[in-house]
Image (cartoon, grey):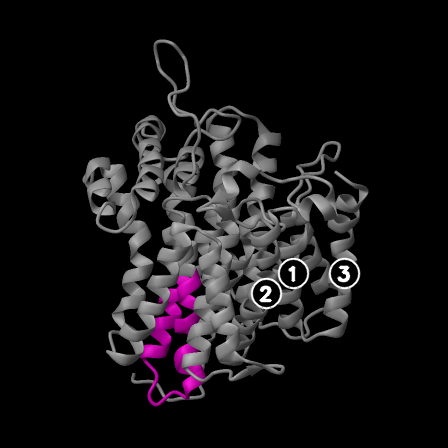
Amino acid sequence: MSALVSIALFGWVPASLLAFAMLRPHRAVLVTTIGGWLFLPTAKLDLPGLPPYTKATAIALGLICGVLLIGRRGRSRFVFRLIDLPVIVLCLGSFLTSLSNDLGLYDGFSATFQKVVFWGVPYMFGRIYFTSAEHLRDLALGLVIGGIVYGVLCLYEIRMSPRLNLHVYGFLQHDWRQHKRYGGWRPLVFMHHGLMVALWMALTTIVAFWVWRCRIVTRIRRLPQALATMALAVTAVLCKSAGAWMALALGVGAYYLHENLRMRWVIVVMLLVFPVYVSVRIAGIVSTEQVEALAHHIFDAERVDSLVFRLAQEDPFVAWTLNRPLLGWGGHGRNWPVDLISGAETVDVVDAQWLTLFSKSGLVGLFSFCATFMAGPLLALRVVARLVRPDPLLRIMPVILCLPVGLFLIDSLFNGMPSPVYTLVAGALAGFGVTRPRSCKSNR
């Protein structure tokens, strides 16, 4: 790694202060969060006596220091609501997990700190600084602009191979052999894995498509929104990820069901996929063979093999975690299923985000994660449904931003590609829902 890694990670805090000094607060939050996640290196700096310093740490410190700089300007008056409880449980549950596994106070504080940095801080900044339809529109545009900028870098790596991180920061963040697909390259840019990049491009394409088709934005500077959407769609497809292709199809299909056929419930169904799937898998209602049989009707043989590989991880992880179902096993490899006779690990690798959460933090961590990402979108949709004759921006912006959250949750069933950006969106929808916009009369 080059010295630029440390310069970028530590320098993001003063860069964030500059953003807060120059921009409206909610836009500074967008620049700090999205910009940091897209362009900071995927590296860990070990500091004496402290948890690792990562890009998530740099983003969280940048946000906190920025707020200290601007004070109360631009933020809503925060009042604790029941909707905020899941993210608190998600963060503090790690401390209880460490204590229940006799891992010590330091481990508990360290695990809690990392959860607060990655999940808690972005959620609360979304909750506090995004409280209107105009704020949500800016958030959607921030996602689209981030997708456009990243799309250019993706196209470079699709042609030249994943090398930007190596050239800029002096290291390759993942095994390059996993990123050769279908006779070409899957881009990495500055993220941890090509699947993470593919999901990002797919979700930003979906937001761009909805914003264009709903006529929320017709141009970004001089770039027509239709052209931007098509360019994003082509890039998302070239990222060569079946999961991203599925997300893209679901997001575009949801538009026609929601807007043309007036099937408003389709967004709610999308949000419910995650809790329904993990519930039936933990309870053993749906077997691996049944999921595999369904996949054969949707994907090609290579993608089905990849899915089966992921599904094969679930059964032993679930069985092992059910020995400590409430708070899980904690970290340090304790969550890894082992053969009780030989002591050998029975699974080589784990991909799914929900399995990692369940095995490390138990049902408390898994369902607090689920509630953190579902509560805001469901509340925002409920508020909009109760409004009489809302203006187009107020009606559609919460719906648009529910899509990246719901599709991220679906992707978390098979991959582990979390991002503080999606947490920010979930918090923003919660903030919008809690303020209950009064620009239109309610049905009540």
Kind of residue at badge 3: Ala
* Residue 125 in the image: above or below residue 321: below
Kind of residue at badge 2: Gly
Label 1 close to label 2 by CB (< 8 Å) = yes
> Is residue 388 one of those drawn in magenta?
yes
> Can you give x and y, in whole percent of width and height, for residue 113 in the image?
60, 42
- Which region of the structure is painted magenta? 375-404
Helix, strand or loop at mark 1? helix
Any mark on residue 35, and which?
Answer: 1
Helix, strand or loop at mark 3? helix
For marks 1 and 2, the one nearer the N-term is 1
> Can you give x and y, in whole percent of width and height, for residue 221 in the image?
63, 81
Q: Main secondary structure of the magenta part?
A: helix
Q: Nearer the viewer, residue 421 or 148?
A: 148
User: Which residue is the site of mark 3?
Assistant: 15
* Residue 195 in the image: above or below residue 126: above
Front of the two marks 1 and 2: 2
| Quarter-of-image position of residue 169 | top right
User: Which residue is the site of mark 2?
Assistant: 146
Q: Residue at x 45, y 79 (%)?
A: 212
Kind of residue at badge 1: Gly
> Can you give x and y, in whole percent of width and height, for residue 254 in the image?
32, 69
